[in-house]
């Protein structure tokens, strides 16, 4: 007997998820097995023993039979990730994943010394600062609040370098006002940007669904929402269409897709909404980007102009020594390309040094940067080493506040529009999160993860699924596998996104009205209170309890 005990063998109880299966409800239709993209289930035969007596006088005897059953495969490679697709397709509620509190999976998941990679999100469930802040200043008698239903609100944020009065290139010559020099382009857009998630990271259907939602919001509902392409290029048809004006094109350290964008320039009939240079991202600062070979399907190879292999965007822009220098060089190239008509912004990871970079850019006499995107630790990502996802990065809220206060101290707030992201809208509270960020000093926010949740992703911050890097996404949101992509209903997904944004818009007005603001309350930190003394002190807002 002792020889049969192999304590190093992996069993279901060593894994994060155990599959609960009720043999008596199962009709052996096999749907769960064929649906599980992680191949975590198999059909097996179990031998059962019964004691029966089939004579008038009891004469018990043992009989054996075999029955087919669905079994969980207990290996790291084919582990259950808790996606719940088996439960979704089972017509008889015979199967479901259950979280295993006794798991040892993180100790066993290190084949050949390779660090664990994960897609999706941090799984440390960090408490959110935004949830500890409330809108505490409600206008009443002397400064009446507005009627959210009937009042007209100005919901626009700048994207582009805003010149201060002393920077405007006006001169009076012979009693005439003359413009001497150029004025940087500024676009006034909706204060929530659909953040940079590439074709490649997202399935083409998911990416298209966001494009469609963007177009509907602009064309039908007059909401000037902009979408960022992410690093990885775009379909040529879109670049040649009028909808390009809603797109912010991204360039990052891998330069993926740019060849195609440059080649398409002569056929562009519209300018893009802007350019976003990605220096770093909040969920894994210093770790670069990674699109795993499993997701580099034929059409991704074509869009990016690469062979099938792991596609790494280096952690830095090679050959450049500082963010300021790299931005200056790229800015010049983009402006050469778009003739100074398109604002260029940068995105950096929130970190202890990000405020210094913002300060330096604000002092730049050439007014090159048209937006500063600060990305915090809770932003999602396609694929990253688990250690980076869980242990590097900085919450965004205090960094946005620090950057805003730094700008106020220079008397230059609002000149380089400040956009914050990384966990904004994470719990479905997009309007409240955006409102609070704006009161703290952001001009607007960018958001990605809530979009993929709305498209149909079932992953969460507590370790459910998060296999976005593997190419096996069970909902068709982050895979390039043609069969899996079919699971996503593109029209329904776009519609859900549009409906959500329309609600966000209404909710946003419901927050603006009580504080009596008919334009975006940028820097109106007096409207906020925190129920946490530490947060109140750090953000310089009143403490309330
Ligand atoms: S929960 Fe998902 S991964 Fe687990 S067995 Fe069911 S389908 Fe497979
Ligand atoms: S459902 Fe797809 S997008 Fe969502 S966590 Fe799983 S793999 Fe990622």
Image (cartoon, rainbow, N blue to C red):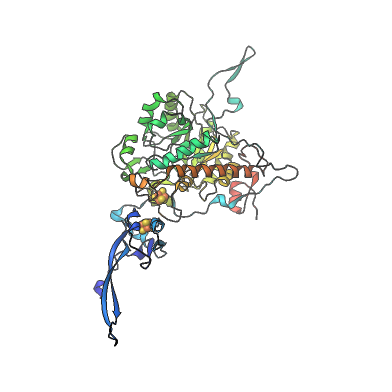
**Quarter of the image with the N terminus in it:** bottom left
Q: Is any part of residue 226 visible from this angle?
A: no
239 left or right, relative to 299: right
Q: Residue furthest right?
A: 142
Residue shown at 44% from the left, 25% from the top: 269
Percent across and percent down for residue 175 are 65, 13
Percent across and percent down for residue 435 are 59, 43
**Quarter of the image with the C terminus in it:** bottom right
105 left or right, relative to 61: right
Q: Is residue 19 above or below residue 306?
A: below
Percent across and percent down for residue 71 are 32, 63
- Between residue 249 and residue 377, name the one nearer to us: 249
Q: Is residue 79 above or below residue 473?
A: below
- Between residue 236 and residue 180, name the one nearer to us: 236
Q: Residue furthest top?
A: 174
Q: Residue furthest left?
A: 3
Percent across and percent down for residue 75 are 30, 60
Q: Residue furthest front?
A: 56
Q: Is any part of residue 368 visible from this angle?
A: yes
Residue shown at 45% from the left, 56% from the top: 462
Residue shown at 33% from the left, 38% from the top: 300
Q: Is residue 173 above or below residue 143?
A: above
């Amino acid at each position: 007997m002792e020889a049969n005990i192999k304590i190093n063998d992996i069993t279901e109880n060593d894994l994060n998820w155990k599959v609960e299966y009720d043999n008596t409800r199962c009709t052996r239709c096999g749907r769960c097995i064929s649906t599980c993209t992680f191949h975590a289930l198999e059909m097996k035969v179990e031998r059962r023993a019964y004691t029966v007596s089939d004579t008038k006088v009891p004469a018990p005897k043992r009989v054996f039979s075999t029955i087919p059953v669905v079994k969980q495969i207990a290996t790291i490679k084919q582990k259950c990730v808790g996606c719940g697709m088996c439960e979704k397709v089972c017509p008889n509620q015979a199967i479901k994943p259950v979280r295993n509190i006794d798991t040892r999976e993180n100790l066993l998941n290190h084949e050949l010394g390779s660090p664990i990679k994960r897609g999706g999100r941090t799984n440390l469930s960090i408490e959110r600062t935004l949830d500890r802040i409330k809108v505490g200043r409600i206008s009443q008698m002397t400064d009446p609040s507005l009627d959210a239903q009937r009042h007209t609100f100005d919901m626009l944020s700048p994207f582009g370098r805003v010149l201060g009065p002393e920077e405007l290139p006006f001169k009076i010559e012979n009693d005439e006002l003359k413009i001497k020099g150029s004025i940087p382009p500024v676009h006034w857009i909706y204060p929530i940007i659909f953040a940079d998630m590439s074709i490649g990271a997202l399935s083409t259907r998911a990416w298209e669904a966001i494009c469609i939602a963007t177009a509907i919001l602009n064309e039908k509902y007059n909401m000037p929402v902009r979408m960022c392409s992410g690093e990885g290029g775009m379909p040529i048809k879109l670049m040649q269409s009028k909808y390009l004006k809603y797109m912010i094109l991204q360039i990052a350290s891998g330069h993926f897709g740019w060849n195609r964008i440059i080649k398409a320039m002569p056929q562009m009939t519209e300018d893009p909404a802007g350019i976003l240079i990605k220096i770093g991202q909040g969920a894994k600062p210093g770790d670069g980007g990674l699109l795993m070979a499993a997701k580099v399907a034929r059409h991704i190879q074509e869009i990016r102009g690469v062979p099938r292999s792991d596609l790494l965007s280096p952690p830095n822009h090679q050959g450049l020594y500082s963010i300021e220098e790299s931005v200056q060089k790229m800015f010049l190239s983009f402006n050469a390309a778009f003739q100074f008509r398109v604002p260029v912004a940068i995105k950096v990871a929130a970190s202890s040094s990000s405020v210094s970079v913002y300060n330096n850019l604000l002092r730049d006499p050439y007014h090159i940067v048209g937006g500063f995107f600060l990305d915090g630790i809770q932003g999602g990502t396609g694929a990253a080493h688990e250690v980076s996802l869980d242990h590097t990065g900085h919450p965004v809220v205090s960094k946005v506040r620090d950057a805003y206060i730094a700008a106020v101290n220079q008397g230059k707030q609002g000149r380089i529009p400040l956009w914050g992201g990384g966990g904004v809208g994470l719990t479905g509270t997009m309007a409240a999160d955006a409102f609070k960020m704006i009161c703290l000093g952001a001009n607007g926010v960018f958001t990605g993860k809530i979009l993929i949740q709305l498209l149909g992703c079932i992953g969460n911050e507590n370790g459910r699924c998060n296999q976005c890097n593997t190419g096996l996404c069970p909902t068709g949101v982050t895979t390039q596998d043609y069969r899996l992509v079919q699971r996503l209903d593109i029209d329904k997904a776009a519609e859900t996104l549009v409906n959500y944004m329309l609600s966000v818009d209404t909710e946003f007005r419901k927050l603006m009205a009580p504080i009596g603001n008919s334009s975006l309350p940028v820097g109106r930190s007096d409207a906020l209170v925190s129920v946490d003394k530490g947060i109140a002190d750090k953000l310089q807002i009143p403490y309330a309890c």
